[in-house]
């Protein structure tokens, strides 16, 4: 929208209003140019999933969640809104899975009163030889989640790769260096226990891999390659 577009003149106040509804999925829409919000889960909207929405250029927020509503945002893009990209109100609960909350025109998230927001991370690993993918939503990118996600990936593959090629996430790699990296002691201990060699990708070279490696990635995580059964 043009910078001087007067949103107060928009024909409708809200793009989509959700009120006392259950099991709603809204996906693949561009919602912009409304007086208040692109999407407003006004009250008691439960089990709502917003998937790949682009909510931009609205007069208040891209998405507003309030009134005991529970909403999941999956891979949504919220930006260029006037007061907040995501606005949460009292008694609401919001889960953000991937996507982007831009801080360009307003704060990424504004919490009024006691709205709770849970932003999940996604760990993804790929076998270098077969391309088999394992993905897991985790609570954070902290060490415990990083280590457990590796274990779960190896269990899913039914074996462990000879080489693990992670991104340079601080939970796993203390000092990034292709030739002499410093691996977190707990991560190194896990690798030793499972008999895999950790060889972090070069900084700025996330495509580094090996045919007999697992490549673990986590929306910022890393890579793991071929499994040794």
Image (spheres, helix red, strand yellow):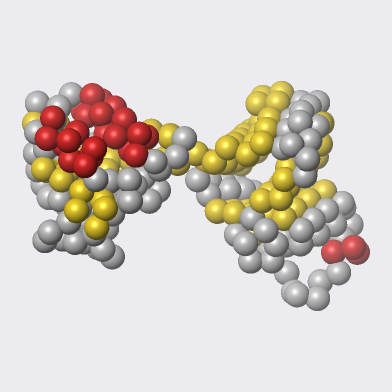
Residue at 78% over, 35% down:
90
Residue nearest the observer in this picture, 21 or 204: 204
- Residue 131 seen in the current view: no
The quadrant of the picture occupied by the N terminus is bottom right
Q: Is 142 displayed left or right of 23 in the figure?
A: left
Residue nearest the observer in this picture, 203 or 136: 203
Residue 179 image position (x, y, % from top left): 11, 61
Residue 114 image position (x, y, % from top left): 74, 37
Q: Is 107 displayed left or right of 6 in the figure?
A: left
Which image quadrant for residue 35? bottom right
Residue at 21% over, 56% down:
201
- In the displayed orientation, state which residue is furthest to the front: 185
177 versus 66 height, above or below: below
Q: Is 140 displayed left or right of 62 in the figure?
A: left
Residue 118 image position (x, y, % from top left): 58, 37
Q: Is 200 displayed left or right of 105 in the figure?
A: left
Residue nearest the observer in this picture, 102 or 127: 102
Residue 16 image position (x, y, % from top left): 77, 43
Residue at 9% over, 26% down:
229
């Amino acid at each position: 929208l043009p910078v001087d577009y007067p949103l107060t003149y928009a024909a409708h106040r809200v793009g989509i209003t959700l009120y006392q509804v259950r099991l709603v999925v809204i996906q693949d829409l561009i919602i912009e140019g409304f007086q208040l919000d692109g999407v407003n889960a006004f009250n008691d909207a439960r089990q709502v999933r917003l998937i790949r929405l682009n909510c931009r250029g609205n007069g208040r927020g891209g998405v507003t969640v309030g009134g005991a509503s529970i909403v999941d945002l999956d891979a949504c893009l919220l930006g260029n809104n006037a007061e907040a990209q995501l606005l949460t109100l009292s008694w609401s609960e919001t889960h953000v899975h991937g996507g982007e909350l831009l801080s360009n025109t307003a704060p990424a998230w504004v919490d009024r009163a006691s709205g709770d927001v849970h932003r999940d991370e996604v760990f993804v690993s790929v076998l270098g030889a077969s391309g088999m993918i394992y993905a897991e939503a985790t609570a954070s990118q902290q060490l415990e989640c990083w280590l457990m996600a590796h274990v779960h990936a190896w269990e899913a593959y039914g074996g462990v790769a000879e080489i693990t090629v992670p991104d340079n996430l601080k939970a796993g790699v203390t000092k990034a260096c292709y030739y002499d990296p410093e691996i977190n002691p707990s991560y190194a201990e896990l690798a030793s226990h499972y008999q895999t060699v950790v060889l972090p990708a070069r900084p700025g070279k996330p495509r580094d891999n090996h045919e007999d490696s697992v490549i673990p990635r986590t929306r910022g995580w890393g890579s793991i390659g071929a499994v040794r059964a």
